Image (cartoon, rainbow, N blue to C red):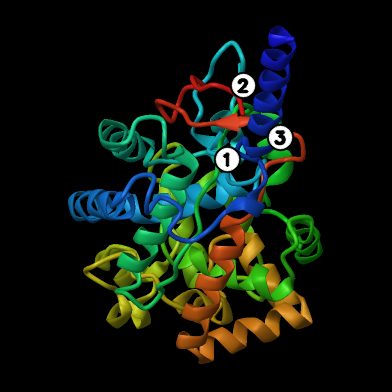
């Protein structure tokens, strides 16, 4: 009789544990998730990001790009952060679509600091979402300001093939972009909103090769000449996405009328992308093709005319992005290091 009672209690305990185990789905996310679990964690992340961007301004755009490339593949699960391993021999980092991803070292530094304070509590996927949110606010001078929920788990799977299949390609047509974003439940307006992130950052020339010979009705010839010059400097170099961030002498040579708009401080996160698109001075084909679609073109005009509206809508779209969940049935947990699967399954 006593043995039966013990077994019954054990079964009840197991069932309770299964019911309360963390879910791999994003439905359990909430604001202030770590308020009691790891007090002050968001301030820890913010402090690191402020210092990192002050030391190297390129960290900011890298984090904004990184969170998109994470969440669009298997949801926001930190899968893009994983290194090559026996379990994941060809991780997302190896995908051509992920060429140039950076800021992994910053996230590892933040994770190590948080682990000292709250071991096995805060996921790398949550750290990345917080970091991108903070970088966005800093780069926009506080104009893009939003809160994100937390409670994500770190995934176990990372596949370059999956990343290549899921991420939008810079050569896509407007219809391909629309279909790609629709698979993640984003509409045409949200596609245009998130594309505004191309007002900051850099890209390899291989990402916009086709633009180097595009006709004048698709790209301003002076800008096309500038891109050809920059891409001829070395093998597949990085070029700034926003001509406003180019070096003054290069702009003076190829686009003298644009000299007054060159900035000493680069990567101001604003609605300049939409003005550039209207002027046909964007580097990606996937940017220009938005002008070939009636609804998308209307939104380009809308956000060029209203910077405040875009600031607000970009924040809302980033919140929605951060809620993309892992595939149904996925397992996850909390990593010790963001680049290594080393946690118990949940």
Residue 97 seen in the figure: yes
Return the residue nearer the eye: 100 or 157: 157
At 57% from the left and 40% from the top, the residue drawn is 77
Q: CA distance from mark 2 to mark 1?
A: 17 Å
| Tag nearer the camera, 2 or 1 | 1
- Can you give x and y, in whole percent of width and height, for residue 47 in the image? 22, 53
Compared to residue 8, the image places residue 52 above or below, namely below
At 34% from the left and 36% from the top, the residue drawn is 111
Counting residues from the start of the chain, the first of labels 3 and 1 encountered is 1
Compared to residue 41, the image places residue 124 above or below, namely above
The quadrant the C terminus occupies is top right
Figure quadrant of residue 119: top left
Compared to residue 14, the image places residue 24 above or below, namely below
Query: Where is mark 3, residue-wise?
Result: 162
Kindly indicate whether the residue at mark 1 contacts the one at mark 2 (C-beta within 8 angstroms).
no
Instruction: Tell whether 221 sits left or right of 201.
Output: right
Query: Where is mark 1, residue-wise?
Result: 77
Counting residues from the start of the chain, the first of labels 3 and 2 encountered is 2
Q: CA distance from mark 3 to mark 2?
A: 10 Å
């Amino acid at each position: 009789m006593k043995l039966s009672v013990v077994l019954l209690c054990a079964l009840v305990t197991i069932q309770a544990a299964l019911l309360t185990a963390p879910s791999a789905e994003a439905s359990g996310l909430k604001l202030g998730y770590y308020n009691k679990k790891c007090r002050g964690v968001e301030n820890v992340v913010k402090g690191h990001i402020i210092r990192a961007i002050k030391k190297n301004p390129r960290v900011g755009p890298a984090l904004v790009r990184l969170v998109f490339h994470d969440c669009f593949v298997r949801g926001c699960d930190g899968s893009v952060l994983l290194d090559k391993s026996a379990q994941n021999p060809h991780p997302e980092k190896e995908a051509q679509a992920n060429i140039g991803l950076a800021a992994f070292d910053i996230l590892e530094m933040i994770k190590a600091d948080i682990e000292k304070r709250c071991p096995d509590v805060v996921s790398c996927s949550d750290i990345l979402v917080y970091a991108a949110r903070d970088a966005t606010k800093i780069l926009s001078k506080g104009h893009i300001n939003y809160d994100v929920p937390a409670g994500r788990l770190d995934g176990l799977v990372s596949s370059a093939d999956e990343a290549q299949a899921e991420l939008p390609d810079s050569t896509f047509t407007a219809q391909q972009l629309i279909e790609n974003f629709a698979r993640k439940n984003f509409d045409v307006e949200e596609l245009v909103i998130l594309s505004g992130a191309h007002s900051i950052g850099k890209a390899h020339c291989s990402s916009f090769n086709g633009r180097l010979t595009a006709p004048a009705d698709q790209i301003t010839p002076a800008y096309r000449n500038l891109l050809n010059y920059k891409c001829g400097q070395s093998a597949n170099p990085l070029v700034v996405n926003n001509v406003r961030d180019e070096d003054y002498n290069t702009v003076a040579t190829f686009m003298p009328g644009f000299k007054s708009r060159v900035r000493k401080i680069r990567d101001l996160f604003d609605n300049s992308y939409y003005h550039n698109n209207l002027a046909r001075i964007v580097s990606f084909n996937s940017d220009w093709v938005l002008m070939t679609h009636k609804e998308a073109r209307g939104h380009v005009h809308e956000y060029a005319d209203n910077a405040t509206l875009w600031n607000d809508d970009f924040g809302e779209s980033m919140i929605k992005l951060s809620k993309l969940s892992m595939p149904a049935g996925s397992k996850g947990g909390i990593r010790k290091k963001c680049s290594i699967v080393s946690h118990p399954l949940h």
